[in-house]
Amino acid sequence: MKLSKPQPRRDTEDYILPLVNIVFLLLIFFLLAGTFKAPDPLEIEPPQSRSEKQAETQGPLTVLLDAQGRLAIDGERLEGEALQQRLAERLAAEEGGVVRLKADAAVDAGRILEVMERLRSAGAQEITLLTALRTG
């Protein structure tokens, strides 16, 4: 009697390894290709609003105003003449003169108006005050 040799069974790991390789390659691709937002140089808790209009994430100049009244542009804290000069340079380069103001909720309204006047004197045509959506 002649017996046939049993066929060697393929290990199930042989089928999973290419899948694992592809998953890791995709993970690395998305980690490298993803965009990360740099943290703001000032800690700001914006006021809450019921408006559901979304602000543009890219584009116009964003000025930050924290609870202590410090200002930042382009991730750099500036004061006085340096602030006015940077504002004028950026607004000259921006088309339309659109500025977004991200102010802390604890900032006095008078201080916000003062900053808005500075922005207008530097050449801002339109100023948008950024708020957070009120939940509940």
Image (cartoon, helix red, strand yellow):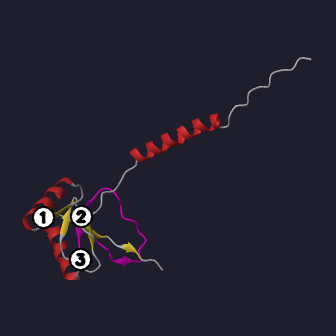
Label 3 environment density (alpha carbons within 10 Å; few <14, some 14–19, many ≥20): some
Mark sitting earlier along the chain (2/1): 2
x then y, percent, for residue 48: 37, 77
Secondary structure state at the residue bearing disc 2: loop
Q: Toward which corner of the image does residue 41 lie, by quadrant?
A: bottom left
Secondary structure state at the residue bearing disc 1: helix
x then y, percent, for residue 90: 18, 56
* Magenta stretch holds residue 60: yes
Of tags 1 and 3, which is closer to the observer?
Answer: 3
Residue type at numbered disc 1: Leu
Residue sitting at x 35%, y 60%: 56
Which range is magenta?
A: 44-66
Of tags 2 and 1, which is closer to the observer?
Answer: 2
Q: CA distance from mark 3 to mark 2?
A: 13 Å
Which secondary structure is most common in the magenta stretch?
Answer: loop
Horizontal arrangement in the rendering, residue 35 relative to residue 3 (left or right): left
Please, which residue is most extreme toward the right here?
1
Give the camera-side residue of 74 and 114.
Answer: 74
The residue at which mark 3 appears reads as 67
Q: CA distance from mark 1 to mark 3?
A: 18 Å
Horizontal arrangement in the rendering, residue 32 relative to residue 76 (left or right): right
The residue at which mark 2 appears reads as 41
Q: Quadrant of the N terminus?
A: top right
Residue sitting at x 38%, y 77%: 49
In the drawing, what numbered circle is on residue 83?
Answer: 1
**Height in image: 82 above or below 132?**
above
x then y, percent, for residue 120: 17, 68
Label 1 environment density (alpha carbons within 10 Å; few <14, some 14–19, many ≥20): some
